Image (cartoon, rainbow, N blue to C red):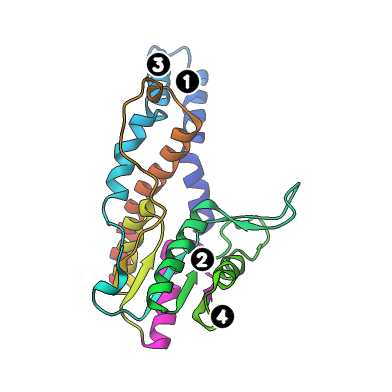
Amino acid sequence: MFILKQFLKAAVLPPVCWILLLAMVVILWNRRWARKVLLAALVMIVLLHSSYAQYYPRYYLESRYPPLVDPGGGEPYDGIIVLTGGMSPASGLKPFPTISEATFRRLDEAWRIYRISHKPIIVSGGHVDPFTPDRDENKIACDFLRLWGVAPEDVIPEPGSRDTFESAVAVKKILDSKHWRRYLLVTSAVHMPRSMLVFRAVAPEPVAAPGDFTLGASRFSPLGIFPSEEAAGAMYLTVHEYLGLADYTWRSRRYRR
């Protein structure tokens, strides 16, 4: 099911969804409605890959949970959970593996909180792509925290999960073994609504501690109406999160049963 989900996700997310739509138009070009579909597809591609189209759907996700500026100002908690978000392996001209930008920012937020509370950090997330060998993604993320100054005994790896739902299930086992209940959940702001949805269902009581905010104030620029690589990437991640919310809403209900 996990592999099937990866294929389905690739098919419905851009740019593959646009390629499939345009291929359908070419195949059915003799139909009267094909040209209308082509025009609609071109308009959608232009609009949905502009800065303004992706800003507000993403803003809704990132603004759901404010940053936890003072983690010590609320109720006590037992530990910190940080979710990984990818890495860049050593290949080609890259001599050393490193973490992705999203993972770096998540770890940076966990490190900031650790300096205030000195609570243990569970690093959750492992290898995702089932068609490539494991590249020690979780170990690399843990090594970053240790290099930054987190005590080795305070870094707890959880390398087995492949998505956020599996992370929640795996983390629940660690929490139970340590008799922890309340914890801070650190991930990207855009990823936080989906993460809180599943962690609340599987491993209560999470407290949102989002990092990796990407949106500043919205300012008009005529160039913002044109499609751009940055806007296309942001739209891809935003649509991915909305699809994930729908998927996890359904899976969380089944899990509660």
Residues in magenta, as a range: 157-179
> Which residue is at 32% across, 81% downward?
181
Q: In the rendered structure, which disc, 1 or 2, sits on the residue that comes first in sequence?
A: 1
Q: Nearer the viewer, mark 1 or mark 4?
A: 4
> Which residue is at 27% across, 45% downward?
60
Q: Is residue 175 magenta?
A: yes
Q: In the rendered structure, which disc, 4 or 2, sits on the residue that comes first in sequence?
A: 2
Badge 4 crowding class, 10 Å Cα cut-off, few under 14, some 14 to 19, many 20 or more, is few
Q: Nearer the viewer, residue 25 or 210?
A: 210
| Real-space Cα separation, disc 1 to disc 4, in angstroms | 57 Å
Q: In the rendered structure, which disc, 1 or 3, sits on the residue that comes first in sequence?
A: 1
- Mark 4 — residue? 152
> Which residue is at 33% across, 43% downward?
58
Q: In the rendered structure, which disc, 2 or 3, sits on the residue that comes first in sequence?
A: 3
**Circle on res. 39:** 3
| Real-space Cα separation, disc 1 to disc 3, in angstroms | 10 Å
| Real-space Cα separation, disc 4 to disc 3, in angstroms | 57 Å
Amino acid type at mark 1: Val
**SS of the residue at dot 3?**
helix
Amino acid type at mark 2: Gly
Amino acid type at mark 4: Pro
- Mark 1 — residue? 25
Badge 1 crowding class, 10 Å Cα cut-off, few under 14, some 14 to 19, many 20 or more, is some
**Circle on res. 156:** none
